[in-house]
Amino acid sequence: MIQFLMLKITFVIPYYDLEETVHKYLSEARHRDVSFDTTHIVGTEDVRKLKFDCDIIIARGITCAALREYHPEITVVEIPVTGYDVICALDECKRRFGARKIAVIGSVNMVYGSPVLNNIMDIEVMVYRVEKEGDASYYIHDAVERGADAIVGGLMTYNFALQTGLNATWIKSREDAIKQAVDEAIRTSEIKEKERERAEFFQIIMDYTHEGILAVDRSGRITAVNTSASRMLGFQRSILGRPVESVLSSDSISRVLERGEEDLGALELVGDSHVAANFVPIRIDNVVTGAVATLQNVSRIVEIENKIRKKILTKGHTAKYGFQDIVGRSDRIKTAISTAEKFSKVDANVLIFGETGTGKELFAHSIHRMSTRSQGPFVAVNCAALPEQLLESELFGYTEGAFTGAMKGGKAGLFEIAHEGTIFLDEVGEIPLPLQAKLLRVLQEREIMRIGHDRVIPIDVRIIAATNKDLGAMAKEGKFRQDILFRLDVLRINVPPLRQHREDVPLLMKHYLNLYRSRMGLPGVAVNPGAMGLLESYSWPGNVRELANLCERLSALCEENIVDCGDIEGLSADTPARSSLPDTAALQEDTVPELKTLEKQAILTAVEAAGGNYSQAARSLGISRSTLWRKMKSLGQE
């Protein structure tokens, strides 16, 4: 909770006879947030010289007027003078001096209503309204010349009259007037406390907002300014009270004051920086009494926009894998990983070439995670999985109403979402030619336009593309743009097919079997040497993805803690079709016969090595004797 200093009230005692009454009432009027002090001042000279350490002053007559003139920063509450107080003074003057023509000389509230007392008191009353201290002396002489035989007024007027040798009395304030003044001062202090709290609240808001805020009155002078505005405008000292033209070179705020119309989104040049400004008029009863300007540094707006865009749009777009997740110890895999690690440190486009299922996306994830963009989003899109129109709207986004079914409010495209990060275009060779022209603009200009909009959106993305096709051959055939290929194929990584690093098969089998068995809550399984030999001899047309699928099936179906040749034979019929890449053309034999040939060779070798002892051969293959007999029968070798 905000704590405020106690408000201070100073009571100016006009004459010493009143001091006891004032102190008595002040002691009774204690307030938890108010402290009282008293002083004695008569005339304006003391008012001009003294400095007051208080928030509110209670005073009377000319002293009150002088305080308001010389100390406008302090609230002054006037001790009221009632008609009854004036009547009492007139009556005293009439009784003491036998006066019949009396001059009442004093401040507005002292003389108010005095003329009507002529008939009531059977005297002639002359009224003089005093606004300045010097007026009292002049009016006394004027009253004497007009036949006044006595003077009634405040203490200062009374003293002047005595110095002139005239009969005089002063208007005294009674206890109820003191009470009324103190009560009014306390009410005023409570209002000031609330105003101070409110002012402090708004000042905190102003000072801690990143926007610069500046307010002017109807004449264009600055009435409020926050820290951000002072910093933007380059001022360390207060600029309150200065003409706004002295700190803002444009006349935008002057036009707002003249026309009473807001001016939003104005671009102002402040020093060497561009500032986005909004100017809004302040209206009271439909009259323009001032204006408020909010200022934002354009570079700051861009920075905040990027943070918001990143936070909102990139939710879930993160790289999940690193190089440690790429399984393999062969020289080919090590070379690919080493190359990718080097490319991670270079902010250039990367083209990953490899057959389907080799793990190209793992390399894309890993490159992003090791790059300088690792804190940015990683957005992956399979270009072959979406039809042309849908792919365009996903990549570039669209505005509301751009086409039938467009989302209300529009949608940001994947390139926008990937701003300051990486976008992974898998199967990039499948992008249709018409869409390749828009992709070229992204590669050349680093900017996009949403469908249905003419506004250019700058983006900062790194593109990692992947393909299992010969893009060079496609470019020669006119199926892929040569200029796009040049811009994508800056850094190339070749991910080898599994048949070229079969020495990694045991490591991959162990990894995926443990992974899937763990997910299923089952104990681990091993692969016996005979089955592993078959797996290492297999060509793996579906690459690592085929191996992973096989491990998932084995994990689900294997009832024992070891995988043997029989388990593999039962699953071989479900093996995916081979890749259609040119260098796999020689491997188009059907998968099942290939495995059966390998299996037959392994069984015959084991039986021969065991000297025809089927029990020993079965043990070496990791299968039972009955399974060996069944397999030999199916192979025609019984």
Image: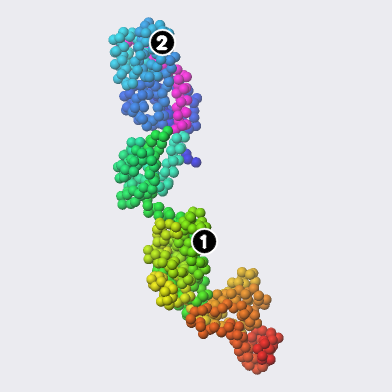
* 399, above or below 32, in the image: below
Q: Magenta segment, principal secondary structure?
A: helix
Q: Residue at the spot x=39%, y=42% of the render?
A: 262
Tell me the crowding category of disc 2: few under 14, some 14 to 19, or many 20 or more residues within 10 angstroms, Cα based: some
Quarter residue 196 falls in:
top left
Residue farthest front in this picture: 404
Q: Position of residue 520 (x, y in %)?
A: 63, 70
Q: Residue at the spot x=48%, y=75% of the render?
A: 468
Q: Which sits in the foreground, 286 or 180?
A: 286
Q: Mark 2 highlights which residue?
A: 117
Q: Position of residue 291 (x, y in %)?
A: 38, 39
> Which quadrant of the rendered structure holds the C terminus?
bottom right
Amino acid of disc 2? Leu
Quarter residue 99 falls in:
top left
Q: Residue at the spot x=66%, y=90% of the render?
A: 636
Amino acid of disc 1? Gly
Q: Does label 1 or label 2 sit earlier along the sequence?
A: 2
* Left or right of 140, for residue 178: right
Q: Which sits in the foreground, 199 or 391?
A: 391
- 183 falls in the magenta region: yes
Q: Which sits in the foreground, 527 or 545?
A: 545
Spatial CA span between label 1 and label 2:
89 Å
Tell me the crowding category of disc 1: few under 14, some 14 to 19, or many 20 or more residues within 10 angstroms, Cα based: few
| SS for callout 1 | loop
Which of discs 1 and 2 lies nearer the camera? The answer is: 1
Q: Position of residue 307 (x, y in %)?
A: 44, 56
Q: Mark 1 highlights which residue?
A: 316
The magenta segment? 164-192
